[in-house]
Image (cartoon, rainbow, N blue to C red):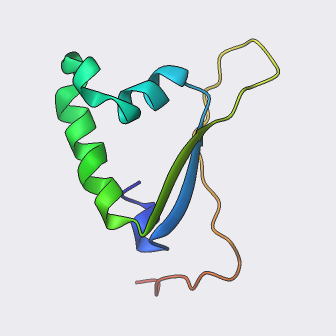
């Protein structure tokens, strides 16, 4: 979320973790994750249009890749 703020404040996120969706919807029900959920809540405020949806996978194996893609129409920050 922090990295995406460099590119756009209108973002839609997807996850295959139903628990993460539940945590974000009802953070008080997950006290063990209070620190992390507070950070997510703070970051949500920075997005004009924040959405997170459950995206189910059709295969049953571990996924070890996290990535993002920036739409072509978004201006890229200058390279140093």
Q: Residue 7 location in percent, x, y?
A: 49, 74
In the image, residue 5 sits, relative to residue 20, either above or below, namely below
Residue that appears at 57% across and 55% down: 12
Residue in front for this viewpoint, 68 or 31: 31
Residue that appears at 62% across and 28% down: 16
Q: Give the total number of marks visible in the rendering.
A: 0
Quadrant housing residue 69: bottom right
Residue most extreme to the top: 60
Position of 32 with respect to 65 (left or right) is: left
The N terminus lies in quadrant: bottom left
Residue that appears at 40% across and 84% down: 80
Q: Residue 61 location in percent, x, y?
A: 72, 13
In the image, residue 23 sits, relative to residue 53, either above or below, namely above
Position of 20 with respect to 17 (left or right) is: left
In the image, residue 57 sits, relative to residue 36, either above or below, namely above
Q: Residue 21 location in percent, x, y?
A: 48, 31
Q: Residue 29 location in percent, x, y?
A: 27, 19
Residue that appears at 81% across and 18% down: 59
Residue in front for this viewpoint, 73 or 63: 73
Quadrant housing residue 18: top right
């Amino acid at each position: 979320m922090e990295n995406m703020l460099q590119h756009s404040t209108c973002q839609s996120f997807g996850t295959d973790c139903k628990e993460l969706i539940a945590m974000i919807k009802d953070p008080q029900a997950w006290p063990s994750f209070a620190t992390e959920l507070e950070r997510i809540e703070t970051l949500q405020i920075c997005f004009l249009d924040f959405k997170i949806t459950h995206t189910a996978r059709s295969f049953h194996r571990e996924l070890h890749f996290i990535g993002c893609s920036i739409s072509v129409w978004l201006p890229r920050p200058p390279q140093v």
